[in-house]
Image (tube, rainbow, N blue to C red):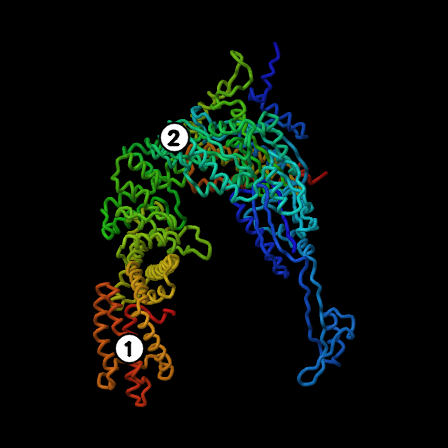
Amino acid sequence: MSDLLFELFSEEIPARMQAQAAADLKKLVTDALVERGLLYEAATSFATPRRLTLHIVGLPPSQPDQREEKKGPRVGAPEAAVAGFLKSAGLASLDEARIDTDKKGGQFYVAVIEKKGAPTLDVLAEILPATIKNFPWPKSMRWGAASAEANPLRWVRPLHAIVATFGPETEEPEIVPFEVGGIKAGNVTFGHRFLAPGALKVRRFDDYVSKLYDAKVVLDPARRRDVILHDCKDLAFAQGLELVEDEGLLHEVAGLVEWPVVLMGEFDAGFLDIPGEVIRATIRANQKCFVLRDPATGGLANKFLLVSNVLASDGGKAIAAGNGRVVRARLSDALYFWQTDQGPLPDFSASGKPPLDQRLEKLRALNIVFHAKLGTQGQRVDRIIALARELAPKVGADPEKAARASELAKADLVTEVVGEFPETQGLMGRRYAELQGEDAEVAAAIEEHYKPQGPTDRIPNAPVSVAVALADKLDTLVGFWAIDEKPTGSKDPFALRRAALGVIRIILENGLRLRLADLIDGALAWHLTEPDPEIDALSAREYLMTVKHLDIAVGLAKRRRTERGEIVAPTGEGYLRAAGVEGELKAFFADRLKIDLRDRGARHDLLDAVFALGGDDLVLIVRRIEALDAFLKTEDGASLLAGYKRAANILKAEEKKDGGGAFEAAPSGDLLVEAEERALFAAMETATAEADAALKAENFEAAMQALSTLRAPTDAFFDKVTVNADKPELRKNRLSLLSKLRRAIHLVADFSRIGG
Amino acid sequence: MTQNPSALDPKKSFQGLILTLQTFWARQGAVVLQPYDMEVGAGTFHPATTLRSLGKKPWKAAYVQPSRRPKDGRYGENPNRLQHYYQFQVILKPSPDNLQDLYLQSLAAIGVDSVLHDIRFVEDDWESPTLGAWGLGWECWCDGMEVSQFTYFQQVAGVECSPVSGELTYGLERLAMYVQGVENVYDLNFNGLDGDARISYGDVFLQAEQEYSRHNFEAADVKKLFGDFERAEAECKALLAFGERDDKHLMVLPAYDQCVKASHAFNLLDARGVISVTERQSYILRVRELAKACGAAWLKTDGAGLVG
């Protein structure tokens, strides 16, 4: 068995692309090998800022031989057919073909084509350059004199050297013979750019890794991350401080260095007046450094950790000092932004309103477009205010506070700090709101209305925050649905899946009894569905007075009445669009809820069983699923399910004979002759009534408990009663009884969708 | 007068830094040019870069370019931000294989020692929407400070670069602050002398920063600037039409001047805050159209290597 060592040595690869590139390299080469019949034992890939490396262990020396039999024409076939056969099979004459006899006794030619497997080295010489030429970099480039020629090699940055050796452990490996873009594959790589820039002759992966290490290159990114994290913690500990861990930053800096050296820098303690999040954002975004927490104060310390790529001759003093200087300059900017945001805004201070309100005025005045078809940020703010005010009483919030928080929620987008560090949006709004004396619930809602941002983010539970968070997300969802910009496949540029999941989790976590249809219609009613240039000058409120909006509102009202059984012919495009958005969005929420519940361990079939009942009160749906899950785990539940399945199977078979719906009529008491069927009938009367009452009280456990009393009579029925009785009227009546049982059980869930 | 070696020392004087870089790149065979005599936002706008990076003809040039960014004015009160500063620009076509090494050698020449300092190439893809240009490369960090921009041009003026040029842009003030160990740009020693003979960056430029900040934000005549933009745009188009001769072009450079003028008028209007978000895009597009037309015309000239 032989191993491959493959290294692509280039100018600095962007940190964010390295992990994916290493994974792609492995997949492309191993897939191509397997496709050519070459199986391997193990493959690993690595990335540093200057190299991508692939190590494949346990490849055979050559492809397996292949033997193929090709059926030809019958003996005595016309010359043209024979010639075609010889050509396609690669035979010189019919002497090389065999003659077989088929079942009917006819004779025909057979060519046996034996293909010798190619040496793996040759296969690699074909696969490796093809992989390089077709590498899926997110962005690639041309360079040098070759870039003037047709079809030049493209790589993420200029490619300088290729190592490709192949051979068994016991022997000197061979160099895979190929050349790409004027670079010949060989066995020479290079060490650290500054610390050991010389050429390194390598044989196989083992000596490659150790020679690189001696030349100050840690090949494995996981190891570089370990070194950085470990050294960061040590240095922090030595100063009595704690590292503020940052996984994303750790990955990034590990992709910026081949030889990580952690150093500590310092800034003036006066800068600690700036909010910690802003300091962290500044130092992280601009300098890619870690910040430290002081356990004594709970706040940040005036120190930071940087990861250098070199072990400097002065121990890193100049490097730490230089970084410190840049951090100070950046923090001066941040301090300036933070203070500027608290002051009056030129051109908007005449109103005498507080600073954040002046920013809101600017936001409106700038007419910043939220989305070309959904109007400006200002119009969006107006919609959110209206919707949050409406939602507030339903979630226990003060409508005026919800409106005020909505009003200020987006104002920080035009502050200096958020302009510089978009990731501090919301948080800065909260800080500035607190500074201008806004109500604490209002200030908190400004930050929390963006939450939850991801599956691990905190879910808001303060009522005002809940109202604004729901309003913000619903406005977005409904808007993008109305203009038909829905997520497709992996594309979700407006993070609509996240918004929907956010709505779901806020509702569930807070046990909010809201119907999705009401939420969607509520948001839709405030929405600009067809903004046009003429109404740009109008506020959203004014727009609401226009005919187009009324059309939607009227449409909704009409449909409500239709649902109550009054027949009203749908009219107008607005009606159709509103109905379409509501239906599609409800289905989208259902999908998100299913995925979320499944991720949290719920059984897929139980989700289907409950979702089949319809309904859009998420809290009830989830409670029903939980009750069902618990019920099926009991013995009563399991045997009721078994009884249900038996009844359903019989019904299915008999319905095939008599036609669907043949047994829907209520069973007749007069035709119940056996004691067991009378018992089941009676038990069903009681159980159904109890289950109905329990369902009305939303007590799913009790409903299922009630149905579980059917277990014994059902079992007895199947034991003693012959369903397919000779007398047709008895048969039909018994099947009707089973059908009634099926309907009764469907009251709590569609058991037909439950497996097992 | 006695000679003072500090006057030329890149670690002690701003002018010494510039002269050292010029000498370094002259030794590499670059034509050392003087600045383009128009107001531009970056060294890239010099026709020695924008136009010369188009076409097959090899080209190596280095020059200092005063760069104006009206919006970055801070009335001389910010130690790092200026509305007028200097870039040192190097353009090498085609990009040599050892461009990174040459760059590092140039840093060593001005006293940035890679044994003592942490020099890093951090991803930064460059794009100039106004020039219709983009390239891949890095910002070069020295101890965490961005001191240069390093780009392999892929497209300029809407034309695919063939071959690709390598472009280096040194932020001269930043580099000088670094090597001189100064925290405020105005404290930079300009001439390398001490005592009464010392001339600082502030002595030369502080008043200008204050006056131009006032001009850019408060006084620049908006109506006139809108007019300037329109006239330069019209003139550029007219000159391009005038120079069109079948498969050749005879008036690219004067037309390009007008494209640059339009771009600067736009920058000033932007600083005055009179261009809305949506309008902004359309102005950028209009300048880009001019740049693209100039680039297309350039390809029909000797400068692009079409002839000879």
Instruction: Where is residue B10? Give x, y as percent.
Output: 58, 22
Label 1 resides on the chain identified as: A
Find residue A714 and name its label.
Answer: 1
Hey, which residue is sitting farthest front in the picture? A170
Hey, which residue is sitting farthest bottom in the picture? A727
Q: Which residue is mark 2?
A: A335
Query: Which residue is rendered at x = 34% and y = 76% of the image?
Result: A648
* Residue A210 vs residue A123, the one in the foreground: A210
Crowdedness near tag 2: few (<14), some (14–19) or many (≥20) residues, C-alpha within 10 Å: many
Label 2 resides on the chain identified as: A
Instruction: Where is residue A304? Give x, y as percent.
Output: 44, 32
Classify mark 2: helix, strand or loop: helix
Q: Quadrant of the N terminus of chain A?
A: bottom right
Query: Which residue is rendered at x = 49% and y = 38% of the image?
Result: A228
Find residue A60 and name its label.
Answer: none
Tell me which amino acid carries mark 2: Leu
Hey, which residue is sitting farthest top in the picture? B1
Q: Is residue A150 left or right of residue A618?
A: right
Tell me which amino acid carries mark 1: Thr
Query: Which residue is rendered at x = 37% and y = 36% of the image?
Result: A415
Mark 2–mark 1 distance (CA, rounded to whole Å): 76 Å
Question: Where, by quadrant of the figure, is residue A606 drawn?
Answer: bottom left
* Residue B70 vs residue B81, the one in the foreground: B81
Classify mark 1: helix, strand or loop: helix
Instruction: Where is residue A502? Give x, y as percent.
Output: 35, 52
- Please tell me whether mark 2 or mark 1 is closer to you in this view: 1
